[in-house]
Image: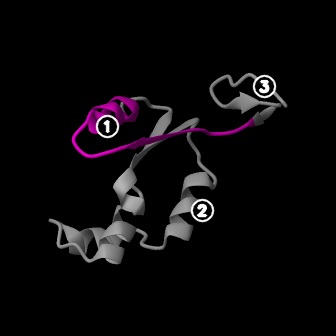
């Protein structure tokens, strides 16, 4: 087992992004947590990246559905690539809702 110290995403001499994937359910403090992370200048926040996939898959008529589907990725494999792909910030905070993958 390899242990290494993470110092704001720098380890083994390479700059990497520290990714925090917060999974939660509806009606909790997840939005407040996300807002606190987005106030950091070294952090990029991804708000419910699987939401468009969820809307497309289940056909729900949620408010703003057409705009979400027009502007966000609906392919879950591409969403995953974005979540683990290159990132220019030191920290990446991902706010996920568990029911978006049901």
Image location (x, y in percent) of residue 65: 22, 70
Look at the image and tell me whether residue 50 can be seen.
no
Q: From this viewpoint, which residue is outermost toward the front?
A: 102
Up-down: is 39 above or below 7? below
Q: Nearer the viewer, mark 1 or mark 2?
A: 1
Image location (x, y in percent) of residue 89: 56, 40
Evaluate if marks 1 and 2 touch, with contact meaning CB atoms under 8 Å apart.
no
Q: Residue at x 66, y 31 (%)?
A: 9
Look at the image and tell me whether residue 5 can be seen.
yes
Q: Residue at x 82, y 31 (%)?
A: 13
Extent of the magenta region? 15-38
Q: Which mark is residue 12?
A: none
Separation of marks 1 and 3 at Cα, in angstroms = 29 Å
- Residue on which the image places disc 1: 30
Is 5 placed left or right of 28 in the picture? right
Quadrant (top left/top right/bottom left/bottom right) for the C terminus? bottom left
- Residue on which the image places disc 3: 4
Q: Residue at x 78, y 36 (%)?
A: 14
């Amino acid at each position: 087992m390899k242990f290494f110290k993470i110092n704001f995403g720098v380890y083994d001499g390479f700059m990497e992004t520290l990714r925090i994937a917060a999974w939660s359910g509806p009606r909790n403090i997840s939005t407040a947590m996300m807002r606190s992370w987005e106030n950091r200048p070294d952090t990029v926040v991804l708000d419910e990246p699987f939401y468009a996939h969820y809307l497309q898959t289940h056909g729900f008529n949620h408010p703003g559905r057409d705009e979400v589907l027009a502007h966000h990725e609906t392919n879950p494999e591409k969403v995953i690539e974005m979540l683990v792909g290159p990132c220019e910030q030191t920290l990446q905070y991902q706010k996920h809702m568990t029911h978006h993958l049901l």
